[in-house]
Every structure is written in C-alpha cells, then in structure tokens.
Image (cartoon, rainbow, N blue to C red):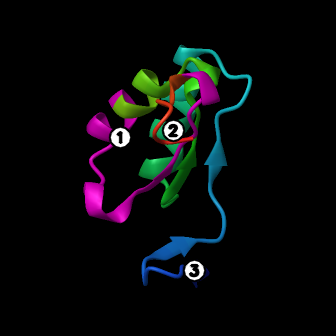
Amino acid sequence: MKFIKLNNGVEMPMQGIGTFLLTPDEAEASANYALKNGCQLIDTANAYCNEKAVGRAMKNAGTDRKNIFLETKLCRHFMSRTMQ
C-alpha cells in the first residue's frame, strides 16, 4: 500500500473506501469488509448519515485503531462562529 506524508508528519494511505450514498447498513458492511481485507483509509462525512455505522465497523473489524485513517467532514452549519 502506498502512503503520503502530510505536513504534520502523519502518513495517510493513498487509497481507501468511501461511504458516500451508502445507507448505514451498507456503510457498516462495506467498511467492515474493507478493514478485514487490509484497507486502512475510510472516508465518511456527517452529511452522509453513516458515521456511526462506520464507527461500529471500525470497532468490530478487529483492526487496531492506530492502523485506521478515518477521514470525515463537517457541514459548515455545525461550526461555531469562532471556527469559521
């Protein structure tokens, strides 16, 4: 698997699985399968409404959390004025 080093020194996998347009059940099953088969990057977002399902998959997949790169996004309306 190829990685890229970010500006903060963290290495991020160059490929992973996305969960856009997946139902929570589909996202959980897909993330679980991917993690059990060597995938280390999962992309989700609050707007996808499947973050909790991805979290369950991460918990149940048997993969050490330090080996999972979770990428997520917040909708702008969730940010306080001080963060904008």
For the residues bearing labels 2 and 1, Cβ distance under 8 angstroms: yes
The disc placed on residue 3 is 3
Disc 2 element: helix
Q: Quadrant of residue 77?
A: top right
User: In the depicted view, which residue is nearer to us: 69 or 61?
Assistant: 69
The magenta stretch spans residue 59: yes
In the rendered image, residue 40, in percent from the top left (x then y), is placed at: 48, 60
CB under 8 Å between callouts 3 and 1?
no
Marking on residue 24? none
Return the disc, 3 or 2, that comes first in the chain's sequence.
3
Dot 2 crowding, Cα within 10 Å, few <14, some 14–19, many 20+: many
Residue type beneath disc 2: Ala
Report the residue marked by disc 1.
Answer: 58
Nearer the observer, 29 or 14: 14
Query: Going 53% across and 16% down the picture, which residue do you hit?
Result: 25
- Per the model, the C-alpha gap separating discs 3 and 1 is 20 Å
Q: Would you name the residue on which mark 2 appears?
A: 31
Percent position (x, y) of residue 60? Answer: 28, 35
Q: Which residues are magenta?
A: 56-77
Direction from residue 17 to residue 24 in the image, left or right: left
- Residue 19 in percent (x, y) is at 64, 34
The answer to if 70 sits in the magenta stretch is: yes
Q: Is residue 29 above or below residue 65?
A: above
Q: Which residue appears at 45% of the width and 38% of the height?
A: 32
Task: Identify the residue at horizontal 25%, vertical 57% (top origin).
Answer: 64
Q: Quadrant of the C terminus?
A: top right
Q: CA distance from mark 2 to mark 1?
A: 7 Å
